[in-house]
Image: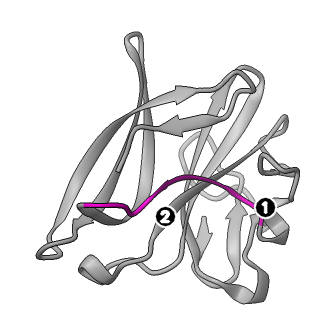
Amino acid sequence: MARFWSGIKLVKLTPEGKRADNELTALAGRKNGGAIEAPFVVHRCGYYYLFVSFDKCCAGADSTYRVMVGRSRDVKGPYVDRAGTAMLQGGGTQVVAGAGAWKGPGHNAVLRTDKGDYNLYHAYAAGDGHSELRISQLVWDAEGWPISGGP
């Protein structure tokens, strides 16, 4: 569950997909209440990877959206970035950001297949600001951190 200004929270669901209780577990946030949303969790090689989007979305070529990640051995956290900074303290390792022809990539999902992993997200064309679905290969470095081929 995302709270744009108050951080990313985890809720427990019943097998039917309903909320099981009123407990919220904080997973990630921004210092000074900066924008964070669009959580996506992937389990790989003993880690849970929490992907989130930072900054401003939906402003066409002026968007500053970018995808960040942290990881934890427990789905409830704590999630930390590559430098060891907790995502609850504003940490996050950048996976993809705007560059060249594409601005404001974010709101990603990870598709895992037997032929490899892919990072799916939207981004805005630098020229006219139209939004497109982008699909980039996602590889994992020797330390287990994701690297996106995007934007």
Front position in the image: 130 or 16? 130
Residue on which disc 1 sits: 87
In space, the residues marked 2 and 1 are separated at their CA atoms by 15 Å
What's the residue at 52%, 77% (across, down)?
A: 55
Under circle 2, the secondary element is: strand
**Residue 6 within the magenta-colored segment of the rendering:** no
| Observer able to see residue 23 | no
Front position in the image: 151 or 79? 151
Q: Is residue 124 above or below residue 61?
A: above
What's the residue at 25%, 79% (across, down)?
A: 60
What's the residue at 35%, 52% (across, down)?
A: 121
Query: In the rendered image, which quarter is residue 106 located in?
Result: bottom left
Where residue 66 is drawn, which disc sits there?
2
Percent x, y for residue 86? 86, 59
Foreground mark, 2 or 1, reads 2
Q: Are marks 2 and 1 in contact (CB under 8 Å)?
A: no
Amino acid type, label 1:
Met
With 101 as the anchor, is 77 left or right in this view?
Answer: right
Magenta range: 91-100
Counting labels gives 2
Percent x, y for residue 130? 14, 71
